Image (cartoon, helix red, strand yellow):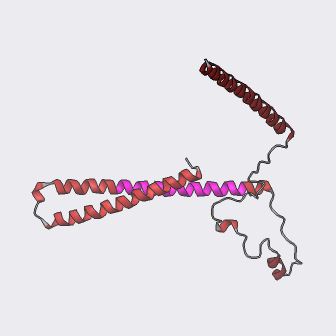
Amino acid sequence: MRLVHAAALAGAALMLASVASAQGIGDVAAKEKEKRKTSAPAKVYTESDIGGQSVAAPTAAAEPAAGEGTATGAAASGTGGTEAKPKSDADAEKEAAERAAKEEAAWRDEMDRTRKAEEACRKAIDDLQTQLNDVSTMYTPSRARAMTALEDTKKKQAELQARLTTLEAEGHSKGYR
């Protein structure tokens, strides 16, 4: 009998604890909701906020020419020290977009050249393998030269495939595809 009373008492205590904690969680959620309503929204930073600088290395076209747009160039030329106007955000964004387009075009050209070179290696390997499979030239000196050329071409093809993998990873990281 005592065991039944103890079990009932323990069950009631557990139920009260769960009800009390559920009310506590609801109160905490309501307070958090009110806190979010009264707090200021988070600041979102864009490229224009940080000056529109990209991660890519600067190119020679982005650097000003000697004496152009700098105080030292104006002072050296004796023009009275007038400085060039700073570029607007729209101009800077346009230049960044043009630079990005040129970089992507150069990347695509490199990919095409590497793919064509790899395809040429594959064709050369096929031709050399066909030549080596010809049993009529089994014991000629040209067979040894063909085997050496086949090995060299396979090495070159492996290098080109590694280069393609590197270029693809680079393009993926820059979002070119």
Q: Quadrant of the N terminus?
A: top right
Q: Position of residue 50 (x, y in %)?
A: 76, 57
| Residue found 67% across the figure and 66% down from its top | 61
Q: Position of residue 92 (x, y in %)?
A: 75, 58
Position above or below: 146 against 32: below
| Residue found 72% across the figure and 72% down from its top | 65
For this rendering, which residue is in front, 92 or 82? Answer: 92
For this rendering, which residue is in front, 158 or 117? Answer: 158
Q: Position of residue 171 (x, y in %)?
A: 54, 53
In the orientation shown, which residue stands out farthest toward the top?
1
| Residue found 67% across the figure and 26% down from its top | 14
For this rendering, which residue is in front, 2 or 67? Answer: 2
Is most of the magenta stretch helix, strand or loop? helix
| Residue found 26% across the figure and 64% down from its top | 149
Position above or below: 48 against 7: below
In the orientation shown, which residue stands out farthest toward the right?
80
Q: Which residues are magenta?
A: 94-120
Q: Along the horizontal axis of the image, is 149 left or right of 136? A: right
Q: Along the horizontal axis of the image, is 33 left or right of 105? A: right
Query: In which quadrant of the rendered view does residue 60 lie?
Result: bottom right
Residue 98 among those drawn in magenta: yes
